[in-house]
């Protein structure tokens, strides 16, 4: 089993309910176990500003699935929850599931880059990640604490327990 950190985000169709349903689906994945989940955070959207704020979280999953089969499973969960992939990269969506970290693996495939290519610049990922893990060293040598220092807690707010 390897520890995988997954970023969750939604800004359409009752985002908190979308994240809860996604967490239940993650917990039901074969050869996997949902370990913990951060608090939910509201964040400003990337890209077009004329869309609702996002609700984000990070989940820790222990899995024996290989990276691409896990990615396929995550994309199936997104599709089951109404995700429609469009040309617009940062548009509104019912659900977005991103593999942020996959154990200590460095992955550079056409469909998957790990660590996630924009991890360092996303407070809505870094702060929830820091909430559920401590002293994390990424496979590429960066530390979570250094990434946090370089990425201010701006444009996000921790939501009250739901």
Image: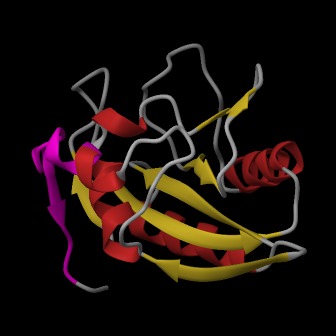
- Please tell me whether residue 75 is drawn above or below residue 36 in the rendered image: above
Q: Quadrant of the N terminus?
A: bottom right
Query: How far across and down, in percent of the image, does residue 86 sit?
Result: 61, 21
Query: How far across and down, in percent of the image, does residue 72 sit?
Result: 84, 45
Q: Residue at 36% across / 50% down in the picture?
A: 143
Query: How far across and down, in percent of the image, does residue 40 sit?
Result: 32, 69
The magenta stretch spans which residues? 147-160
| Left or right for 129, reference 44 | right
Q: Residue at 52% across / 69% down in the picture?
A: 59
Q: Is residue 25 magenta?
A: no
Residue 90: quadrant of the picture: top left
Q: Quadrant of the C terminus?
A: bottom left
| Left or right for 85, reference 68 | left
- Please tell me whether residue 11 is drawn above or below residue 25 in the rendered image: above
| Left or right for 93, reference 129 | right
Farthest top residue in view: 87
- Please tell me whether residue 155 is drawn above or below residue 87 in the rendered image: below
Q: Is residue 150 magenta?
A: yes
Label tally: 0
Q: Residue at 43% across / 35% down in the picture?
A: 92
| Left or right for 129, reference 50 | right
Farthest front residue in view: 141
Q: Residue at 37% across / 57% down in the picture?
A: 56
- Camera sees residue 72: yes
- Colour scheme used in the picture? secondary structure
Residue 34: quadrant of the picture: bottom right
Query: How far across and down, in percent of the image, does residue 51 sit?
Result: 29, 33
Residue in the foreground of this view, choosing between 51 and 123: 123
Residue in the foreground of this view, choosing between 123 and 140: 140
Residue in the foreground of this view, choosing between 101 and 72: 101
């Amino acid at each position: 089993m390897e520890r995988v950190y997954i970023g969750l985000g939604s800004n359409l169709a009752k985002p908190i309910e979308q994240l809860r349903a996604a967490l239940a689906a993650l917990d039901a994945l074969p050869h996997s176990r949902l370990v913990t989940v951060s608090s939910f955070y509201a964040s400003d959207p990337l890209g077009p500003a004329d869309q609702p704020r996002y609700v984000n979280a990070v989940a820790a999953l222990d899995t024996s699935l290989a990276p691409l089969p896990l990615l396929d499973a995550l994309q199936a969960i997104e599709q089951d929850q109404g995700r429609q992939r469009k040309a617009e990269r940062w548009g509104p969506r019912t659900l977005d599931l991103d593999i942020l970290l996959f154990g200590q693996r460095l992955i550079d495939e056409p469909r998957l880059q790990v660590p996630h290519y924009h991890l360092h610049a996303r407070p809505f990922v870094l702060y929830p990640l820091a909430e559920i893990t401590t002293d994390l060293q990424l496979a590429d040598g960066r530390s979570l604490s250094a990434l946090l220092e370089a990425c201010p807690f701006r444009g996000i707010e921790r939501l009250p327990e739901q």
